[in-house]
Image (tube, grey):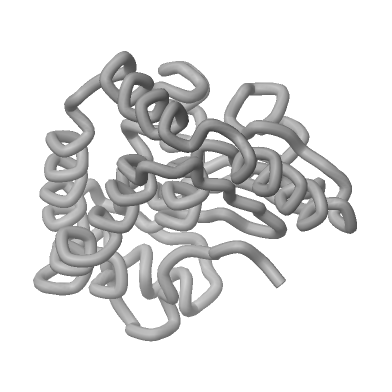
Amino acid sequence: KGFCSGADLSARGDSSALGGKGGSHEALIQHYNPAVSQLIRADVPVICAVNGPAAGVGCSLALAADFTIAAKSAYFLQAFVNIGLVPDGGSTWLLTRAIGRARATRMMMLGEKISGEQAEEWGLVYKCVDDDALMDEAKALAEKLANGPTLAYAHIKRNIATAIDQNLQMVLLAEAEAQRIAGASDDAKEGGMAFLQKRKPEFKGR
């Protein structure tokens, strides 16, 4: 009943579901980062319809689309900091460019939920609609784009990517390395255990 709530922390009793030795770093390099890159580099417009949570890398996947339509039930969340980790999957690149440094910092450092309506107000998404209109809105947009100048769309996408920045790949690698380090920390282990035990984590800064 939701778009994507991020990695399943209950799958493993420590930070390795998101970081640490082997877990997240390999998943980011081999799976998540290529997926985000492919969405951004695709020669066709990508539409994403979001209901419920778009958290963690799910937030990255949603924002990598050209047109992200949010239901009023949707929210966008970067809660890595709550378990001693860092945003990944291109979130640093995507959020900063979409909503600016101050708001991106607010999302990533405070781990606040951003509602679909607030996301539209911030320019984080194309538009926010009622839940029961979400798929109709997405399908109508898809039909409009499918009947448009698809060759021009491909070049527009490339030019937008060039105009914004060509350093996404560097950011993806930097995030993956930071996540590897953060995921191996005592704080990440404590964060994972606290999540499973439904208590407030006690971070030590190491």
Decide if residue 206 is in sight here. Answer: no
Q: Is residue 162 left or right of residue 132?
A: left
The spot of residue 46 in percent (x, y) is: 50, 46
Mark yes or no: residue 133 visible: yes
- Which of the pair 70/163 is nearer the observer? 163
Task: Please tell me which residue lies in front, 202 or 171.
Answer: 171
Q: Is residue 144 left or right of residue 13?
A: right
> Is the residue 206 above or below the residue 68 in the image?
below
Label tally: 0
Q: Is residue 172 above or below residue 156?
A: below
In the visual, does 73 lie left or right of 198?
A: right
The quadrant in which residue 94 appears is top left
| Rendered residue at 36%/42% (across/down) | 43
Question: What residue sits 44% from the left and 54% below the top?
Answer: 56
Q: Is residue 61 left or right of residue 120?
A: left
Going 17% across and 51% down the picture, which residue do you hit?
176
Residue 127 vs residue 88, the one in the foreground: 127
Q: Is residue 140 above or below residue 169?
A: below
Picture coordinates of residue 182, whole percent (x, y) = 19, 53
Return the x and y of residue 36 as percentages of the image width and height. Answer: 33, 50
Residue at point 82%, 54% (across, down): 136
195 or 33, which lies in front? 33
> Residue 70 in the image: x percent, y percent?
70, 45
User: Which quarter of the rendered picture does the N terminus lie within?
Assistant: bottom right
